[in-house]
């Protein structure tokens, strides 16, 4: 199957996208690329209607009260494709005291502008023992941003395979969500809103998921076949962020078709594309520069007394000098106004990035 025919199938409606992905991989000579049946979850596009978005906002309000130990009544019913994780902003210093605040109670830090640039650096990830056992496990994290630029919908996808150790520590850290060629490459949008979905999957230790992902990318965005071997040789090397027109408006989402055919396990974290505001006048949920924690929805519900600590090479969540036993991801978010020159090119980018201020930075990506 050539690239054009694959992309045409991928843009079709309904379940044709995973069918196309299946056909593409099954046409390969590599027996390891066989695909199991796709779970119905992976047939969802991830798009939220206004009622689901509003329901998620109410759920976030409930979660904001519970993390502070306040009495709260959980909203009746569960919004469709509500995240199975909580996204929380840390209001405090690293290694110091602070509190957590949810995106519903935050206000966007940016004024309305013609364009924005956005990036995030992964500072640490920890796996819960109940989900990963005592090490010798492997997982995949995917972070997707949907934006618009010059009226064209764009999907930015970060996907990274990682290993989990006996104490829940992982090989996933100090990666930029927006990077290309080993250097930071900010996500650029002219929309004050940005849609976010995070998925966390566990799969068999022997699964060669990253190679399969790269195989699919070679069909969709024309990655050179010679680059596949080099990129999978080291798990610590992040998959480049793929910026492609959102061909998936009528069908299933890109990562859904991709991940749905490559694992027999449902994600530990899953969600639809929840909308957040970068600037004034956007969604009721806001993303602002700073330290953010993505953590299981049902573990460590009350986060009083939890601190963000530098654990030497990564950042973790600690209570009473013990690392908490939950799945959590810690990221540093940077967002600012941008000036564009030509299509999607940022000029006069600020050099005083929030990410550069007093945080562990991977010098190899600078």
Image (cartoon, helix red, strand yellow):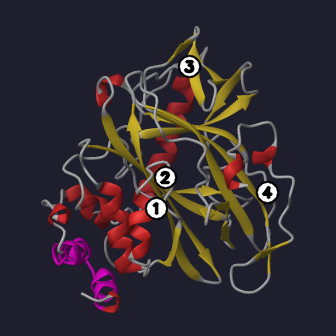
Q: CA distance from mark 1 to mark 3?
A: 28 Å
Magenta stretch, main secondary structure class = helix
- The local secondary structure at tag 1 comes to helix
Q: Is residue 148 above or below residue 212?
A: below
- Mark 2 and mark 3 in contact (Cβ < 8 Å)? no
- Mark 3 and mark 1 in contact (Cβ < 8 Å)? no
- Mark 3 and mark 4 in contact (Cβ < 8 Å)? no
Comparing 213 with 291, the one in front is 213
Magenta segment: 5-28
Residue wearing tag 1: 50
Q: Is residue 298 above or below residue 324?
A: below
Q: Residues within 10 Å of mark 3 (few under 14, many from 20)?
A: few
Comparing 302 with 179, the one in front is 179
- Point out the frontmost of discs 4 and 2: 4
Q: CA distance from mark 4 to mark 3?
A: 30 Å
Quarter the N terminus occupies: bottom left
- Mark 2 and mark 1 in contact (Cβ < 8 Å)? yes
């Amino acid at each position: 199957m050539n690239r054009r025919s694959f992309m045409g199938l991928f843009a079709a409606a309904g379940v044709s996208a995973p069918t196309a992905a299946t056909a593409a991989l099954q046409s390969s000579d590599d027996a390891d690329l066989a695909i199991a049946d796709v779970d119905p979850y992976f047939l969802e596009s991830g798009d939220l209607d206004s009622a689901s978005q509003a329901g998620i906002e109410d759920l976030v309000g409930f979660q904001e009260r519970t993390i502070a130990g306040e009495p709260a009544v959980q909203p009746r019913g569960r919004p469709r494709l509500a995240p199975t994780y909580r996204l929380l902003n840390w209001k405090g210093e690293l290694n110091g005291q602070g509190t957590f605040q949810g995106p519903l109670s935050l206000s966007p830090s940016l004024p309305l502008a013609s364009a924005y640039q956005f990036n995030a650096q992964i500072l640490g990830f920890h796996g819960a023992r109940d989900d990963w056992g005592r090490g010798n496990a492997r997982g995949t994290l995917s972070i997707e941003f949907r934006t618009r630029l010059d009226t064209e919908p764009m999907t930015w996808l970060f996907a990274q395979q990682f290993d989990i150790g006996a104490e829940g520590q992982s090989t996933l850290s100090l990666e930029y969500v927006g990077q290309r060629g080993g250097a930071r490459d900010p996500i650029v949008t002219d929309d004050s809103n940005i849609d976010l979905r995070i998925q966390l999957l566990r799969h068999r230790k022997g699964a060669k998921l990253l190679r399969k992902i790269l195989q699919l990318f070679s069909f969709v965005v024309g990655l050179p076949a010679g680059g596949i071997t080099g990129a999978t040789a080291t798990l610590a090397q992040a998959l480049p962020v793929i910026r492609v027109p959102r061909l998936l408006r009528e069908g299933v989402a890109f990562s859904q078709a991709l991940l749905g055919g490559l694992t027999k396990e449902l994600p530990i974290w899953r969600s639809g594309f929840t909308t957040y505001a970068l600037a004034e006048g956007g969604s009721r949920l806001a993303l602002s520069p700073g330290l953010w924690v993505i953590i299981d929805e049902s573990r460590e519900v009350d986060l009083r007394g939890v601190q963000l600590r530098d654990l030497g090479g990564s950042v973790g969540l600690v209570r009473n000098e013990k690392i908490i036993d939950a799945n959590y991801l810690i990221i540093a978010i940077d967002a600012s106004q941008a000036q564009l020159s030509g299509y999607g090119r940022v000029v006069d980018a600020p050099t005083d990035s929030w990410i550069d201020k007093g945080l562990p930075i991977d010098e190899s990506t600078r």
